[in-house]
Amino acid sequence: MGACWSKRIKAESPFHTGVNSGNSSSKSSTVPATRRSEGEILESSNLKSFTFSELRNATRNFRPDSVLGEGGFGSVFKGWIDERSLIAAKPGTGLVIAVKRLNQEGFQGHKEWLAEINYLGQLHHPNLVKLIGYCFEDDQRLLVYEFMPKGSMENHLFRRGSYFQPLSWSIRMKVALGAAKGLAFLHNAETKVIYRDFKTSNILLDSDYNAKLSDFGLARDGPTGDKSYVSTRVMGTFGYAAPEYVSTGHLTAKSDVFSFGVVLLEMLTGKRAIDKNRPSGEHNLVEWAKPYLTNKRRILRVIDVRLEGHYPLGQALKAGNLALQCLSSEPKLRPRMDEVVTFLEKLQDTVKVAQKEHASIHDCHSTDGKASGRTAYPRPSASPLYA
């Protein structure tokens, strides 16, 4: 199946979902797994319907200095609303929000806007970004989300400057676990949801570096009945899509697992999935890094140098092996996301133990008998885009 790859590939998003999960820490509503009309999606979403005027006031008329980010979809603006009434509030007061204003690019943009409402209007989980409401007025299509103070994982991994200090090993593993929980929740819904565009720019971070998945415009319902895959036009982001999906258009939950492997590798290496500016042979991160993930000596060559050696080598090797499993060319050999969560939870436990041991050793060697307060892990600053 042919595909025209750009930085992001867009395709149709059907609206016939039923979602429910047995996860006690999350909520969702059960919806008949039949095709739903636009009106039915908007009415059943339980989201606030904002007027364009309300969001214009909340964002101070979409001022340029309120822009949090820009992309092919349009721009995201910072705004403020009253927590109870949800009407516009003075800057610096009330609830901080992020308002995505879509480009008026026709039917495709509208479908992705509707897909976000369809999924995030029903699905609720600590590792999914919260959609507060939407605006559907004339040609205007906007979405209103909770504000994520630390911005995207992409910014922290790849942008340089004083505002983007290197993320510590423990925070990277915390983000990986949170993102994995989000995907596992989607895959274990009564009607499986395949995210289809998992990448670092879609992982947003709150003030405590808790990861939340955002941008559900390309999500799809998973296969039902005796079907093992969903047939779709190939879309997503080059470098993250599973090879069998690119070649056949057959979409499964294991497609998301491959994408998770790519993102985990980016977290380990501090390198982008695709970068034509790197030396020949290193343009594709997966192809270049795979051979180095199998033993302690070789993995040292790919671990992010900005960590400056402040990471447990044994844990790095285990994380590398997990990435390798997720990146298997054979989908059946990739782990399920709930298995990935279990593995990362165990790894997280060892990270905490190692931190306690380090703190204890540091206390014992303190010259004045007191802890100096220093830590082996550099602490990141807030993103200027989301401050």
Image (tube, grey):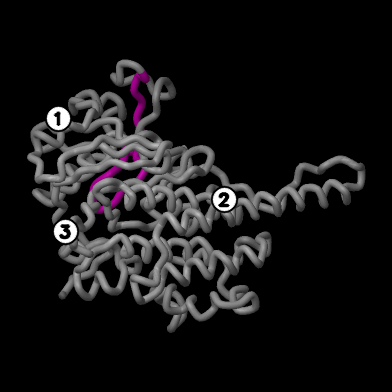
CA separation, marks 3 and 2?
Answer: 34 Å
Relative depth, front residue between 269 and 179 = 179
| Position in image of residue 24 (x %, y %) | 41, 37
Please give the name of the residue rendered at 39% of the width and 25% of the height, measured from the top-left corner. Answer: 95
- Determine the CA span between mark 1 and mark 3: 25 Å
Q: Pointers 1 and 3 in contact (CB under 8 A)?
A: no
Report the predominant secondary structure element of the magenta stretch.
Answer: strand
Which residue position holds label 2?
171
Q: Which mark is residue 378?
A: none
Return the x and y of residue 40 as percentages of the image width and height: 11, 34
Q: What element carries label 3?
A: loop
- Residue occupied by mark 3: 11
Q: Is 80 covered by the magenta stretch?
A: yes
- The reply to whether dot 2 and dot 1 touch (C-beta < 8 Å) is no
Please tell me whether mark 1 sits on a helix, a strand or a loop: helix
The residue under the point 57% across, 52% down is 165
Residue 290 belongs to magenta span: no
Q: What stretch is highlighted in magenta?
A: 64-83
Q: Number of numbered discs present?
A: 3
Amino acid carrying mark 2 in the image: Ile
Which image quadrant is residue 371 in?
Answer: top right
Question: Which class describes the residues within 10 Å of circle 3: few (<14), some (14-19), or many (20+)?
Answer: some
Q: Which of marks 1 and 3 is in front?
A: 1
Q: Marks 2 and 1: which is nearer the front?
A: 1
The residue that label 1 is drawn on is 43
